Amino acid sequence: MRHVLSAHNRQQEKLVKKLSRRRAAAMGTVVSTIAGAVIFAGSGTAQAATTCPGSRIDRLSFDTGWVDLYYSNGTNCVITTSRTPGVKLRMIAQLEVLGGTKKTDSGYYSYHAGPVSLYANGACVRFLGQVGTTGDNSDWGHCG
């Protein structure tokens, strides 16, 4: 009887080892998947933090977000940011050069619209931002 139990115990040990290897492999897959998701999420966060080059020279703030105007070497740039990151809302970032071009980025975004850039050295600009149903727009200014 002892010999039979011993053989039975060896079969159980083999089964446990086999299951342990499978479990370890499965856990490795789970850990790899989670690590990949964290890396992917991290890259998404980096995109969410995208800004315009240069220095911020103006900000219009409103209930659902704000729009920032940046300037660098004759180029103006705007980016509209939501106060509820992660929630997909209609957003607009728009920049216009007096007597020249108007450029707009609009769509349903979770973090920001833009950046939108235009060369405007020596010209006045106006800009606007909208998140959801509220927003704000500037007068002509920042000439030069």
Image: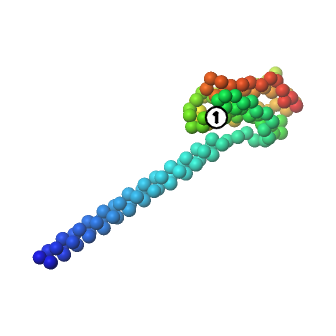
Classify residue 43 as left or right of residue 21. right
User: Which amino acid does the dot numbered 1 rest on?
Assistant: Arg
Question: What colour-coding does the image apply?
Answer: rainbow
Q: Looking at the image, how many numbered discs can be counted on the residues?
A: 1
Outermost residue toward the front in this view: 63
Q: Which residue is mark 1?
A: 83
| Residue closest to the eye, 85 or 106 | 85
Spot occupied by residue 95 in the image (x, y as percentages of width and height): 74, 28
**Residue that appears at 84% across and 30% down:** 142
Classify residue 64 as left or right of residue 22. right
Spot occupied by residue 55 in the image (x, y as percentages of width and height): 80, 41
Residue 9 sits in quarter: bottom left
Spot occupied by residue 25 in the image (x, y as percentages of width and height): 38, 60
Classify residue 54 as left or right of residue 38. right
Placement of the C terminus among the 4 image quadrants: top right
> Can residue 15 be seen?
yes
**Residue that appears at 67% across and 41% down:** 50
35 in relation to 62, above or below: below
Secondary structure category for the residue under label 1 = loop
Outermost residue toward the bottom in this view: 3
Spot occupied by residue 112 in the image (x, y as percentages of width and height): 64, 35
Placement of the N terminus among the 4 image quadrants: bottom left
Classify residue 110 as left or right of residue 81. left
Using a 10 Å C-alpha cutoff, classify the residue at mark 1 as few (fewer than 14 neighbours), some (14 to 19) or many (20 or more).
Answer: some
**Residue that appears at 78% across and 38% down:** 56
| Residue closest to the eye, 101 or 80 | 80
**Residue that appears at 43% across and 54% down:** 30
> Can residue 76 be seen?
no
Residue 3 sits in quarter: bottom left
Residue 123 sits in quarter: top right
Outermost residue toward the top in this view: 99
